[in-house]
Structures are given as C-alpha cells and as structure tokens.
Image (cartoon, rainbow, N blue to C red):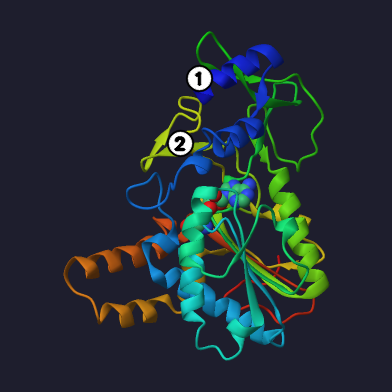
Amino acid sequence: MSLKDRLIARIARLGPISVADFMAECLHDQEFGYYATRDPLGRGGDFITAPEMTQMFGELIGLWIAQVWMDQGRPTGILAELGPGRGTLMADVLRATRSVPGFHAAMDLHLVEASDVLRQMQAENVPGAAFHGSAADLPEAPLFLIANEFFDALPIRQFQMNAAGDWQERQIGAGADCLIWGLAPPAPLSVRDGFRPGMITETCAPGEAIAEEVGRRIATHGGAALIVDYGDSESTGDTFQALAQHAYADPLEAPGDADLTAHVAFGPLARAARPVVASGLVPQGVFLERLGITARAQALADGLSGSALDTHIAAHRRLTHPAEMGTLFKVMALTPDGAPAPPAMEPAP
Ligand code: SAH
C-alpha cells in the first residue's frame, strides 16, 4: 500500500486532515516519508541548497558565528545546527573557523536531525557531532545555532477567510482514489488585521515552539541563532509547495515523493523567541555582501578555470542576485538583550 492509499483510507475512516498532519506524514513517515527514505539534496536530487552550491556560504556563516562568539567574551558552549542536510554547511563552518584561536576548543558540536539517512551523511562530514531529534534535547549551555532551510520544512496550517469574514481551515479530504482540498467549518483565529475574504494565512506552531526553546536558552546562557530561509516578516498567503526533481509538483499527487515546504514567517518566530532580541530581516544577498562574499569569490576564482570557474561564478550570482536567492531568502539573528549587535544585520524593527 502506498502512502497515498494509506492516507485515503485513513481520511475515509477518520475524516479530513490538516495541512500540518499531511506534511508530517509525507515528510517523516518511517516507511514512505520524504526525508526518512532519501537524501533529497544536490543536483541529482529534488532541490539544492546554498551550502551545496558553494563553500562560500558556510565559510561566511562560520566567520559570522566566530565574531559573535568573540563579541560575547568567548564562552564555552555548543555549536548546533537544525536540519543539517548533508552536513556540508557545518563542515564549511568548521573549516573556516579552524584558525580562530580557541573557538573549536570552546565548542561542542550538536546536530538536530530527524532523518536517519541524513544523520549518516552528517556523521561522515561532521565527525564527533552528537545527534538529537529535537532542539529541546540540546544540552543547556551557551548556544551558537544555525538553521538554513530548516524552518520551511516544518508543518504549517492554512486558514482561509470566507465571505462572512470568518476563518476556515484548509483541509485535505479523500475522493474515491485521490486526495482533495476542502475547508473545515468556521472557527475563531487570532490574526493581524488587513485580510479580505478569500485570502489565506499560514501558521507554524512547531516553528514557534522551536524558536521559543532556542530563545529561552540564548536568554539564559548566552549565544546566538542565525536563521536563513525563504519567506518574509509575516505570512503572505498560500505558500505551500511541493518540489520534485527541481520542478514544482502537485502536493497531493504523490505523497512522500516530493519535498513539501512553506515560506517562513519570521515575525512569529521573533515574537516566540522573546526575551532575546531578533534582528531586522536582511535579504540573503545583502547579508553575504556585507560579510565580504565578493572578495572571497574573487580570491577563490584565482585558482579556478574552465567549467569550475563558470560554476563558481554562477553559484555566487545565485546566492546573491535579487532575481535568484538574494532577495527571496532572508536572514534573522537572535542575540541576548544587551549583547553587541551581530555583524551584517539590521537593528531590531
Ligand atoms: N540545512 C541543510 C538542509 C536543508 S533540508 C542545507 O542547507 O543544505 C531540511 C533539513 O531539515 C533536512 O536535514 C531534514 O531532514 C531536516 N528536518 C526536517 N524536518 C525536521 C524536523 N522536524 N526535525 C529535525 N530535522 C528536520
């Protein structure tokens, strides 16, 4: 029985499910789940992330973290990543910070990862790291944390405003042999103003819970978090999407075989992380330029020629250009109240 058949049978028996329940099943089911059963990253996979395109991304983030660590008085603590994929980003961070005096000695490595397949790759690329299933299991210590394209993978719920101005949750129901969209009966929902009938808003309770947990640790012990993802300060409508083999797919068509994500609303994460201070959002392109990506790209280009040089130039452009990832992706930092402002960020709004 496929995951689709199992979901159809379950819905026929127990009723429609939320987008969040659907995402959780499709991504993490032990037998069929997208992340549970494969390595989705890279040119041959379904999508490619910044650290898989170029070493520069992780190198600059490594120097950002080391700077924040120095600014906070070089505490002994943990260097952690949420959803490390293949471990490439953390490997680049570690290589770039090797010559920062005392940094490696002060940091224990911790990776939060749900997928056993990806844990194996991470263990090879980041030797000595400890693994956890959830951010809540990290040791209590000064926390220096990175999360690139992690929050977009967390289950969201969607709500649509009806003609009467009430909110109805979007749900997934079942036909004879297919999954179909539907709406739950109206129910109260607390959202900001400015919505009109027909508009959709999204919430991500798991993301807020993780931001709250990370915020509490940074407020208590010190440290910082750097969150990079596509999205904006608030939910911007229907952003639920499926990606397979680098192309958009119908999310209901082949459950478990496509990556399911939604844009990240950073504002709710910032509010959940209080009392730590959330920086203003910085577009990824601006963030990387401020950290010196162009100088680093030129230095690396000196040693390259032919197709390797072309690939390198294309990766630099893809990460920073406004028409590619440069504007869609945003960066937000969380730091303790009263700590020095982190490099390359905007002040809190
Ligand atoms: N940060 C990596 C990979 C991004 S893909 C990169 O930039 O290349 C999303 C990652 O988050 C994968 O490693 C996936 O297995 C992990 N993940 C998704 N949902 C998770 C959850 N609920 N808990 C822990 N890890 C999760």
In the figure, residue 88 lies in which quadrant?
bottom left
Q: Residues within 10 Å of mark 1 (few under 14, many from 20)?
A: few
Q: Residue at x 52, y 82 (%)?
A: 97
Q: Residue at x 38, y 81 (%)?
A: 295
Q: Which residue is mark 2?
A: 258
Q: Is residue 170 left or right of residue 31?
A: right
Image location of residue 14, percent across then percent down? 71, 16
Residue 291 seen by the camera? no
Q: Which mark is residue 343?
A: none
Q: Which residue is mark 1?
A: 1
In the figure, residue 106 lies in which quadrant?
bottom right
Q: Is residue 174 left or right of residue 271?
A: left
Image location of residue 307, percent across then percent down? 19, 65
Q: Is residue 134 left or right of residue 301?
A: right
- What's the amino acid at mark 1? Met
Front one among 194 and 188: 188
Front one among 289 and 104: 104
- What's the amino acid at mark 2? Ala
Tag 1 or tag 2, which sits nearer the N-term?
1
Image location of residue 100, percent across then percent down? 54, 88
Q: Residue at x 33, y 51 (%)?
A: 43
Circle 1: element type? loop
Front one among 33 and 220: 33
Image location of residue 195, percent across then percent down? 69, 36
* Extreme-left residue of the structure: 306
